[in-house]
Structure formats: C-alpha cells, structure tokens
Amino acid sequence: MRGVLRVRVRVRQDFLLGVAGVLLAFAICEVVSRAGIVRRTYLPPASEVLARAVELAGDSAFLDGVGATLRAWALGLGLACAIAVPVGLLLGSVPVVDAASRAVVEFLRPLPSVALIPLVSLLLGSGTETEVVLVMYASVWPILFNTVYGLGETESLAKDTLRAFGFGRLAVLLRVELPATAPFIAAGVRISAAVALILAVATEILAGFGEGLGIFIAQAGLATDGTRDVLAGVVWAGALGLVVNAVLVRIERGLFPWTPEHRERKR
C-alpha cells in the first residue's frame, strides 16, 4: 500500500514539476516580449501565441493540414514497422546475414532524411509519397536496432529448453524470442513515432509542397508579421508530439507491465 502511495506521489510530483516548467517558460517569454527586451516582431507574447493556437482549432483549413501531416506520419511509421521488425528479426537471428549487411546499414543509418529530399522528390515527385518515404526512412532505424537488441537479450535457457523438447528454429522464434523482443520493439516504435512526426513537419517546411502543418508554418514564416502564426504552429506540433508519446506510453505499459521500467514505476 505504501509503495502504491509513493508511486502516486512521485507521478503527481513529476507532473506538477513538468507543468511548472512549462508555465515558467511561458511566463519568461511573456515578460521578455512585453518588456520590450525582444521586439514583438521576433517574439510575440506567449499569451497571444496560445490564443492564436486555440483559435486555429476552429480553422477547418488548418485542421485539414494537420490531418494531412498525421496521415503521412501514420503511413510512414506503419511502413517502417512493416520493414524494420522482419529485417531486425532476420539480422538478430542469422549472424551471417547480420555480418554481411552491417556495412550497408552503418552507411545508411547516419544519413539525415532531410538531405534526401531532393533525391526522393526527383524520383517520386512533389507529393505525399515523398513525405511518407522520408518519414519511413527516418523511422526504420530505432525499430530495427531495438529489435536486434531485444533478440540478443532473450534468455538462452528458454530457447535451449524448447530445443531440448524438439522444437525447431521457427517455433523458438515465435514462442520465445518474439514475445521477449516485443517490449523492445514497442520502445523502438515509441521513439520512431516522435522521429516520424518531426520528419513529417520538417519535410513539409523544407520541401514546400503539398499541405500540412509544416506548410502552414512555412507560409506563416514568409509573412511580414507571421511570427505569431509560426509559433502557434510550433505549439500545435509540440502538443501533437506529447499526445502521441503519452498514448504510446500508456499502450506500452498496458501490454508489457512486467518490464523493469514499468515495474519500477509501480513500486
């Protein structure tokens, strides 16, 4: 009982500290802007930015753009999962394949997705396909490496026990390795979800085609007095990221409550 109370108190304290940090940051921005330390052209008061962000919630055209960004995000992340999990299982299960592909993987992994915008745009054109492919490319790596790492952390005793009872390689993979790796895959998906959202917005801003939250921010940045709209768009992007992460964390805790990270939160 005391352990549960301690966890609740700690969670509440963490939440309140987070809220206090956000309020302090907004208060500093408000004071700096209204005191004239920074011109309003460059830093509007935080209250005006928040008011504009709330106002955008009633703008159907803006919400359509947000929906377009979320669709590209979901498609790119889904494709990344469909590619990274099987490939990660293959690399983690077959050392020869892992060794043969390591040089290629290590070459491709550091390449920033935004640097590939011209190439992908040339191949696929200026459309949603380009955004989805770039989001997918950036999202693949956390899932892939978490899958490989999870396989490496699987208990050898459990695998040896199944082999001793005559189970084949596929049965060991499906009955032991995949369930043991699932929490690592989920963590990789959560990390990739944030990366995917960043890339979706960044691609829209840098490429400048299509529709989406990034297009709204880019167009606002070209306006003479568009700083308030730019920051309001950034607030929306940050809020979407917080919501996505919170949802995935909740799902992860529900599916894998036995993992050390989640057990620690229950103590």
Image (spheres, helix red, strand yellow):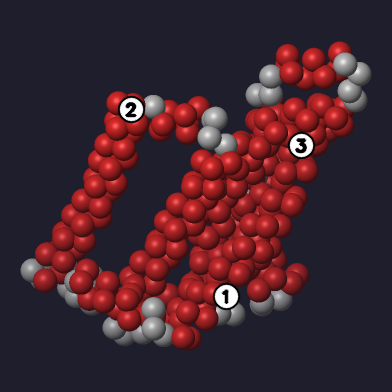
Q: Quadrant of residue 92?
A: top right
Q: Residue type at mark 1?
A: Ala
79 over 93 or under it: above or below: below
- Which class describes the residues within 10 Å of circle 3: few (<14), some (14-19), or many (20+)? many
* Mark 2 secondary-structure assignment: loop
Q: Residue at x 29, y 30 (%)?
A: 6
Q: Is residue 134 left or right of residue 211?
A: right
Task: Determine the residue positioned at 72% across, 46% down.
Answer: 84
Q: Residue 137's mark?
A: none
Q: Residue furthest front?
A: 1
**SS of the residue at dot 3?**
helix
Q: Which residue is mark 3?
A: 89
- Say which of 83 and 220 sits in front: 83
Can the viewer see residue 10 in this picture? no
239 to 112, vertically: above or below: below
- Considering only order in the chain, which callout, 3 or 2, is on the residue closer to the N terminus? 2
Question: What crowding class fits label 1: few (fewer than 14 Cα within 10 Å), some (14-19), or many (20 or more)?
Answer: some
Label disc, if present, on residue 68 of the rendered structure: 1
Residue 42, by quadrant, is: bottom left
Q: Quadrant of the C terminus?
A: top left
**Mark pair 1, 3: CA separation:** 32 Å
* Circle 2: residue type: Met
Where does label 2 land, which residue? 1
User: In the rendering, at what x and y percent does residue 183 appear?
Assistant: 61, 36
- Comparing marks 1 and 2, which lies closer to the viewer? 2
Residue situated furthest left in the rendering: 35
Identify which residue is drawn at 89% across, 23% down.
Answer: 167
Q: Is 25 on the left-hand or right-hand side of 108?
A: left
